[in-house]
């Protein structure tokens, strides 16, 4: 009886180990500058690694070894700064959030900020156009509808040697995505 129990426990342990490895096999482990280690999951959520000490108190932007940049948010989500998270399906209507980043440089702050905002809106329009199955959508229609929508925009401005650099992070939520798609589909111009 003891031998069967020991054999069962070994098999059970191996099954649990295999299951745990399959769960975390595609996760990306990342050590932050503060020394905290986190796991980035495929569903764009993250957790502290087992045994990690410390606490993430503010959103962080990090450049990975492969050159990609990610934003790790305190609400336990993350995304690539140069593209939106992959939706659960191919239909944009099911996207929870769409993100984009626009950048520009130049001597005039107003022109640079305008160019960065336009670039971010263009990137959002490209994402929506690429993932939506709605008919009659164009980049220009989507851009005009994005401009009209009240979206979340974070702007970072820096100046060096009389040259301005502006980075714009833009995001829209599910209801805004649906509104923009409907607006672009109905737009005549």
Image (spheres, rainbow, N blue to C red):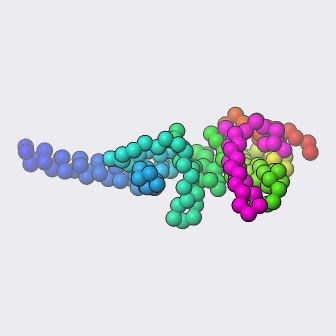
Name the residue: 55% across, 45% down.
Answer: 59
Residue span colored magenta: 144-173
Residue 131 visible somewhere in the drawing: no
Foreground residue among 160 and 39: 160
Q: Main secondary structure of the magenta part?
A: strand
Percent from the top left, x then y, of residue 83? 64, 54
Residue 111 visible somewhere in the drawing: yes
* Residue farthest toward the bottom in the current orientation of the protein: 66
Relative to 107, 83 lies left or right: left
Foreground residue among 100 and 184: 100
Tell me the quadrant of the picture where the C terminus can be found.
top right
Name the residue: 81% across, 42% down.
Answer: 147
Foreground residue among 145 and 60: 60
* Residue farthest toward the top in the current orientation of the protein: 175
Relative to 188, 28 lies left or right: left
Name the residue: 7% across, 43% down.
Answer: 1
Using the image, determine if residue 71 lies above or below residue 96. below
> Residue 66's quadrant in the figure?
bottom right
């Amino acid at each position: 009886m003891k031998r069967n129990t020991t054999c069962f426990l070994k098999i059970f342990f191996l099954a649990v180990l295999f299951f745990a490895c399959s769960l975390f096999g595609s996760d990306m482990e990342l050590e932050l500058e503060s020394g905290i280690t986190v796991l980035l999951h495929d569903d764009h959520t993250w957790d502290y690694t087992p045994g990690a000490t410390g606490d993430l108190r503010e959103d962080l932007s990090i450049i990975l070894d492969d050159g990609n940049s990610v934003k790790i948010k305190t609400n336990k989500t993350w995304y690539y700064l140069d593209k939106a998270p992959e939706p659960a399906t191919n239909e944009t209507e099911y996207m929870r959030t769409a993100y984009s980043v626009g950048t520009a440089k130049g001597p005039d702050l107003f022109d640079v900020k305008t160019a960065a905002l336009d670039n971010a809106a263009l990137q959002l329009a490209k994402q929506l156009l690429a993932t939506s199955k709605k008919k009659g959508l164009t980049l220009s229609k989507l851009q005009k509808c994005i401009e009209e929508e009240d979206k979340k925009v974070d702007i970072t401005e820096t100046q060096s040697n009389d040259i301005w650099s502006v980075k714009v992070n833009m995001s829209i939520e599910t209801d805004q995505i649906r509104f923009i798609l409907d607006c672009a589909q109905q737009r005549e111009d």
